[in-house]
Amino acid sequence: MTEDAKPARLLAGELWWKAGIVYQVYPRSFQDTNGDGVGDLKGVTARLDYLAWLGVDAVWLSPVCRSPMADYGYDVSDYCDIDPLFGTLADFDALVAEAHRRRLRVIMDFVPNHTSQDHPWFREARASRDNPKRDWYIWRDPGPDGGPPNNWISNFGGPAWTLDPASGQYYYHAFLREQPDLNWRNPQVRAAMMDVLRFWLDRGVDGFRVDVIWHLMKDEGLRDNPVNPDYVAGEPEINSLVQLHSADQPEVMQVIAEMRAVLEEYDARVLIGEIYLPLERLVAYYGVDLSGAHLPFNFQLIQTPWHAPALARLIEEYEAALPEGGWPNWVLGNHDQPRIAARVGDAQARVAAVLLLTLRGTPTLYYGDEIGLGRVPIPPERVRDPWEHNEPGRGRDPERTPMQWQPGPQAGFSTVEPWLPLDPQAQTRNVEVLRDEPGSILTLHRRLIALRREHPALSVGDYRPVSVDGDVLVYERRHADETIRVALNFGHGDCKVDADIAVAQPEGAREGWEVLLSSAGGRRGERPLGGHFALAGDEALVLIRRAAAAQG
Ligand code: GLC
Ligand code: CA
């Protein structure tokens, strides 16, 4: 890979999702404007100025379509309408227009694997065995013992099949029984769903995050999944079987290519796929000749132990696994995963922010992580996530709590008690308080985002590993004649980083590193002392190579 091969390949139209930063909004929890304790579209629109101030490029909205909310919008009953809880189609159009006015793109969540049981398609399908919509879902006769047709398990625990007593057949659901899986082998289903994409693309949506995209195709024979010999009791029940036949089937690539082809009918739209698979399978979702997802979500930072050597190995393996021309991406959290601050602690959450925003690849930032939200305690009577009821301890409510905007009642999120509790520290951990603190995690995010925008090396430059030494990981990003070096301390102890310029200098030339940013705040413009920079525990430094004044 030559130094500027990658940037040269960037097409103007794609640049927004390659060089840009995606910000995920969980609409129920961003901003309530009508006093019902639940966030809404007008609320997102009202907060666009904040997102522009923060400096992100795109907003991904978790589902806002019509839904009975059994899985909080991931159970859609009308793909072409907005749920009244969130507002109207007119509110959505206004959001898109206002976002575009601020040069912010809008990415929708598309949930094609399953519908709600209340979707008219499923109501019809369920009406009788010979209904024309019957084959839009996955129906089978009971197994020989009268039980489910195979051993597949729901991702939320329990059987993945529910008996429909009226017809005597079972239907398949990879998630809740309220979320029947569509039959993507049926061409009518495909056509109907491609029209859904066009419906939103025509309204100006800039792309989609496709929910559980690796699940769309199942083994045609619906064979039993093998037992997982490595299963450890206490893990989610879904892990007790290897998902060999229920997901990640080769035929799914064709479906994704079809979605991609629809997007190609429009200008510069992005296709992001939710994929929880090991690296070598994940990268297959770029598709043959990059005909698949532009960005198969890379969740490896969520799953890798938070240690310098493990993270260094991950980055290298990911970079090596990418297909030619495939653009990388990185994520620290989302509405399904414990928040980064809950996983690694407040101090390391700052290091994590530097990592996310200086790695090569599109970063997706989860709302609230920029103010350092952690695991918000949820009292038993306030549990909302159905998964928590099925498998206690697995619930995702602690990472879905309201955004905290200002001191005062409900932290500015609502005028009434919100649908999920606020963080007990909401009076101090909020945007209004943190935005003026030079050392706050919010200020750190904003600076990092600005830095990424200012320095193409950080957004589109090459990645080069430099060293892993104990708890400290060092890498470089390069573009044209700009070189940026990032040093991250994943430990709590103080240490030093080498400030040598590895490249031989022509006679007389003097170059050196200079601090652009420290995760701890301050230090900007600092030069090395005795060939080193001091690096405190839990600190990360971003350095730039400058044709330099005298070295210390
Ligand atoms: C995805 C969503 C998750 C949802 C599930 C079923 O993993 O991110 O929130 O429960 O799909 O749609
Ligand atoms: Ca509301």
Image (cartoon, rainbow, N blue to C red):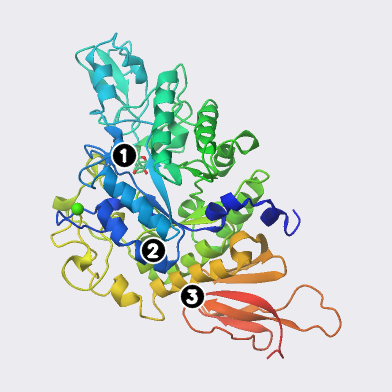
In-front residue for pair 496/506: 506
Q: Is mark 2 within 8 Å of ligand 2?
A: no
Amino acid type at mark 2: Leu
Quadrant of image for the C terminus:
bottom right
Residue 214 spot, x, y in % from top left: 47, 34
Mark on residue 519? 3
Residues under numbered marks 3 and 2 in contact, where contact means CB atoms less than 8 Å apart: no
**Classed neighbour count for the residue bearing mark 3: other residues with Cα under 10 Å, few (<14), some (14–19), many (≥20):** many
Q: Secondary structure at mark 3?
A: loop
Residue 397 seen in the figure: no
Q: Tell me: residue 50, above or below residue 552.
A: above
Image check: 473 left or right of 370? right
Q: CA distance from mark 3 to mark 2?
A: 21 Å
In-front residue for pair 108/104: 104
Mark on residue 51? 2
Residues under numbered marks 1 and 3 in contact, where contact means CB atoms less than 8 Å apart: no
Q: Secondary structure at mark 1?
A: loop
In-front residue for pair 19/241: 19
Residue 11 spot, x, y in % from top left: 63, 50
Image check: 163 left or right of 173? left
Task: Report the residue at 44% width, 32% height from top.
Answer: 215
